[in-house]
Image (cartoon, grey):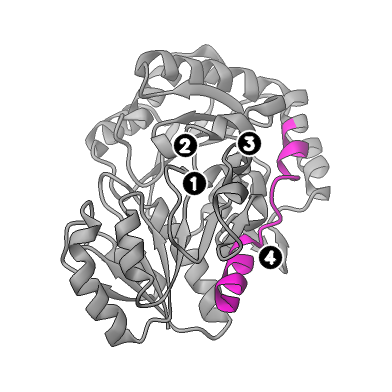
Amino acid sequence: MIGIRADANEEIATGHIMRCITIAKQLMKAGERVCFFVADEFAVPMLNWAGMDYVCLQTNWSEMEEELPILRYELKKAGCEKLLVDSYRATKGYFEELKKICKVVYIDDMFEDVYPVHMIINYNAYYERFPYKQAYGQDTKLLLGTAYVPLREEFFNDGGVYLKKEDVAEAETSAKEDTNGCHVLLSCGGGDAYNALSGILAEAVTRDGLKYIIFDTVVGRFHNNEGELKMLAGRYEQIVLHHNVGNMAELMGKCKAAVSAAGTVLFELCAMHVPTVFFVCADNQKYDSDFFAREERMLFAGDIRTDREVCIKEICTRLERLVRDKKLQTEMKQKLCEVTDGNGAERIAEEIIRL
């Protein structure tokens, strides 16, 4: 059995659990039995929705060493041979204890330490800024770079990305020459600690260049200010709220552009070839700008934590430019289609099975 240790809640949102579910599905397709181990009940609805087995440890998600006695018992009880860990709260001591029970895989995109594990995964393009190869010896398998981006199945068909390269030119040719009724995706992941969505919408509706844009706004499971979003949507017909989106690829596919917080969603937008304005709202996103903003692959609007109002204005200014500049849209689509082939989760699953 292969275990997965990850959590989701208001503070860390849904990204960790969602990418682990993607990997779990590929493991199960290969015939492996998978079980999630979570600290509390927050992630349970997502796991049930995905059809995943799980054990709720009833522990403090932010103090992972304290959970070791019960986790050790549950891993042995389940016959866990390998464990994938996806949490920034894991420590060296935590991994040292887990290694006594099973082989350990860690998704590490921060490189804050060198961990005693059997496999490290960092699928981000910025992995090169960290000395993984020098820091880890031959005994640690390294899965590095965008070949390992764990895109959900909805973003690829028949072993390739959902939207093929030849579709870019066709889609651009058939696009209307104005922005009337143009759909723009707006997303901030599972949570929105800085109320980015309401701030962006409140600013966007005042801009002449965005007057006729339809904002398809994805409200995350842990969004803490939904009332303000509902108020804006009630006042402006161009704001459409989406809850519990079952097929994000389908929603992205109808959008001409997107505004999003950084993270795995940027790779999903690459797979769908959606020109994007993005911003940073968490520490683990701070290096995304290095890659995605390079040569205007996407338009970077800054870190919303540094100055929220300035960042929101920059987002709307860049979006105004993007929706009216057809040449920029075409150039961005051509660059986006080169980022990922959509098979990263399958590659990760294969390497975990081989471990």
Single out the mark in the foreground, 1 or 4: 1
Query: Can you tell which quarter of the image residue 196 is in?
Result: top left
Q: Identify residue type, mark 2.
A: Gln
Where is residue 110? Give x, y as percent.
46, 42
Work out whether residue 2 or residue 47 is closer to the camera in this orientation and state it. Answer: 2
Picture residue at 43% right of the left edge, 81% below the top: 81
**What's the CA distance linking mark 1 and mark 2?**
9 Å
Q: Does the CB distance between marks 2 and 4 fall below 8 Å?
A: no
Tell me which numbered mark, 1 or 2, is placed earlier along the sequence: 1
Q: Secondary structure at mark 3?
A: loop
Find disc 3 in the rendering and name its residue: 256
Q: Is residue 343 magenta?
A: yes
**What's the CA distance linking mark 2 and mark 3?**
24 Å
Q: Is residue 85 above or below residue 203?
A: below
Q: Does 206 sit left or right of 150 as displayed?
A: left
> Can residue 249 be seen here?
yes
Q: Identify residue type, mark 1.
A: Asp
Where is residue 84? Give x, y as percent.
43, 67
Decide whether the magenta segment is chiefly helix, strand or loop. helix
Q: Is residue 86 above or below residue 230?
A: below
Find disc 4 in the rendering and name its residue: 157
Picture residue at 40% right of the left edge, 77% below the top: 102
**What's the CA distance linking mark 2 and mark 4?**
28 Å
Find disc 1 in the rendering and name its residue: 109
Which residues make up the magenta segment?
332-355
> Can residue 216 be seen here?
no
